Image (tube, coloured by chain):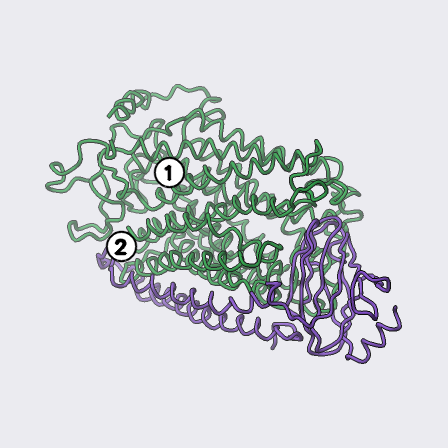
Chain colours: A green, B purple
Amino acid sequence: MATVEAVAGQMAHAHHDDRSFLRRYIFSTDHKMIGIQFLFACLFFLLVGGLLAMLIRWQVAFPGKPLPFGGIFPETMAPNGIILPEFYNALVTMHGTFMIFFAIMPLLVGVYANYLIPLKLGAPDMAFPRLNMMSFWLFVSSGIIMLASFFVEGGPSAAGWTVYAPLSAVPEYSGVSAGQQLWIVSIVFFAASSLLGSVNYITTVINMRAPGMTLFRMPLSIWSLFITAILALLAVPILAGALVMLLFDQTIGTTFFLPEHGGQPLLWQHLFWFFGHPEVYILILPAMGMVSDIIANGSRKPIFGYHSMVFAIAGIAFLGWIVWGHHMFQSGMNPLLGTSFMVSTMAIAVPTAIKVCNWLATMWRGNIQFHTPMLNATAFVAMFTVGGLSGIFMASNSLDIFIHDTYFIVAHIHYVLFGGSLFAIFAAIYFWYPKMFGRMMNETWGKVHFALTFVFYNLVFFPMHIIGIGGHMRRIYDPTQYTFMQPMQPMNRFITISAFLLFVSQIPFVINFFWSLFKGKKAEINPWRDNGLEWTVPSPPAHGNFEITPTVYRGPYEFSSPEVDEDFLPQTTPLNGDRRTAPEQVPGD
Amino acid sequence: MNWLPPALSTYAADIDRIFYVILVITGIIFVAVEVTLIVFMIKYRGREGRKAYYIEGNTKAEVIWTVTPAIIVLALAFASQDVWSRLKNPDRFPSDALTFSVEAKQFEWNFTYPGIDGVLGNGDDFTIRNQLHLPVGQPVVVHTSSIDVIHSFFIPVFRIKQDIVPGMVIPVWFEATETGEFELACAELCGLGHYRMRARVFVHSQEDFASWMAEQS
């Protein structure tokens, strides 16, 4: 109860907003503004990652040909516009780094955990608003440090986003010294930011739910963000610790990962992937959760098998801790371990299949509304299925011998992280934009953006499966060096042209996003006729969110309930008899 | 149309078979999911005045789609296991193999051959850069090591790949089934020359190999 009273105290501030410009937009402690700040920062980093991908694709398709506009690069990167091998390795490294750490992960967690958790649970803000602000500014610092590494001597890290030692640990091996150190420092900042966020999300979910919001009345978006926060809390410190060891190896002469004095290069891989595999689920679970919300809304039906969806999220999160070795089948670790990691990896197919089947069953006999968020959410289901199935190829340790480190894995990760996570992010942006900014995005242009992205995305990444099966290695500066890869060059050029078109296809989104900020149709309180608590307050919600702490009477997916005439039933609407049965206290107290 | 490179080692066909089995199984699941999705999207598209069917779940259906994938993936794991252990477990390596060694460094492969006595470490060993010579129809074990960073020993036509880790000696085996010249690639990013860290693989007939070995030592 103490929490609720504290909440009520803070509500007094909700009515008059007399914060200065600086406190309101820059150093804000309001979770909504922090979520929006994360959104702008992450979209910028998404653009950076995308531009790097374009440079990579140019080089792979047209090795040795000068880049259009290549004159802007210095001699040390691309003399006369021709990309150097060391710069190519840096591009590959930084594309992965920006996309994973600065785009996908914070787009899911930084933006939507921040924005949605308090609003969907009926809380006025996060449990620790100042930590939340600090989390954002640590993230910005870490992004600036990472960008700065482009401008130091030797360029940015060129050891791959997994920065395998000894290549990453010894400057002579990679030709990069300061850039690699900045990479490490940046990711340590990032880890601190992520930790502060996780502590906040977990505390808020446990302690700040409105009366009646039992754990099993939480939307799946909140369940997945909650479990993701637990994963991040436990996994990210491992990365931070390993990175400090790597920094010591590079700067003060320790040899944790160097064999000369008894160190072990494989130790880096074990530590990295012990973080890295939970990280993969950090990058997909929130997407699954938000897509579940949007598919139920779009189908006008309750999510099929709500409880099994929650247990599937928890199951994937748990299994995520015991599968890291599948990244290391060919690494030289004991081959007996290859067997146990194969079995645990294969087991992940089970909760994943539950989720896909439940999404399909949610759409079964629905009344499906094809708004832009729903289109992107169905694309998530379709494309994530491909990514999930291609994972089975690599989970087979013996087949992995051949396809490990080929374009097959590149295709797989992009089907999961672009086809999966990024389509979910687009769905979420279109869906919650009206709440965030008080205006609707344009539906027609949203659909154009969706259709173009869906087509070109598949034209880019599907052929990568085929050249991967042909043995085409990843991270190869010039594929024409190998006779057996030369016949794949037409396919490489096709992929590259599709990639350019995919990049251009994002222009409608950018224009729509910024145009709608000022000129979009004014959003109603509940434009998608949804049941969540965030749709009971004005768009955008005031500082403090709720004028009166809401009471929750039911779960979030009561669409087309036979109890009411309308096809939705908000969580806060009491029906006859609800007043008596509604819990008086915050559950869990 | 053949996506996979030619299968030219004794176990290459086994790996390809696993590929095709998984391709068929995942292909069926892929088609089933995507067709279901599209049919539902058309059949249950929103119409004015219609209300969706209110249902929260069905335990029987959920048990079916939990148990079925579990059985499929366990079967796949079992099917993969034997090939894996045959290829990677040194206890199961062929006993009649020739033994070579390779030392990888940025960005070259130095193969050491045992000479005519057939034993590494005796005086007649010799080393050749970026050329792997071996006889057809004879198992070969290569002891891999690296003096700088991690490399990866990849011969696509043999379907073999093994990371080479500094500080470790990791054995790799294969047995070629056809003579000819093929390519060996480094498959692990190892620095700026990674893309050209390539070696040629010469598979000789047994007689040609014997005379080549005699010539070299």
Secondary structure under the numbered disc 1 in the rendered image: helix
The location of residue A187, given as percent across then percent down, is 58, 36
Tell which of B197 and A557 is nearer to you: B197
Tell which of A34 and A231 is nearer to you: A231
The location of residue A136, given as percent across then percent down, is 50, 31
Residue A343 appearing in the image: yes
Say which quarter of the image contains residue B120.
bottom right
Residue identifier under label 1: A116
Tell which of A582 and B90 is nearer to you: B90
Left or right: residue A80 versus residue A149 is right
Residue identifier under label 2: A301
The location of residue B30, given as percent across then percent down, is 44, 67
Secondary structure under the numbered disc 2 in the rendered image: loop
Q: Is residue B80 above or below residue A228?
A: below
Q: Amino acid at mark 1?
A: Leu
Q: Amino acid at mark 2?
A: Lys
The location of residue B90, given as percent across then percent down, is 62, 63
Measure the alpha-carbon separation of dots 1 and 2. Answer: 21 Å
Instruction: Tell me which residue sits at (67%, 55%) in the image.
Output: B188
Give the chain letter at badge 1: A
Query: Which numbered disc flags the more N-terminal residue, 1 or 2?
Result: 1
Instruction: Tell me which residue sits at (36%, 29%) in the image.
Output: A125
Q: Is residue B146 above or below residue A536?
A: below
Do circles 1 and 2 both sit on a common chain? yes
Badge 1: residue crowd in 10 Å (few <14, some 14–19, many ≥20): many
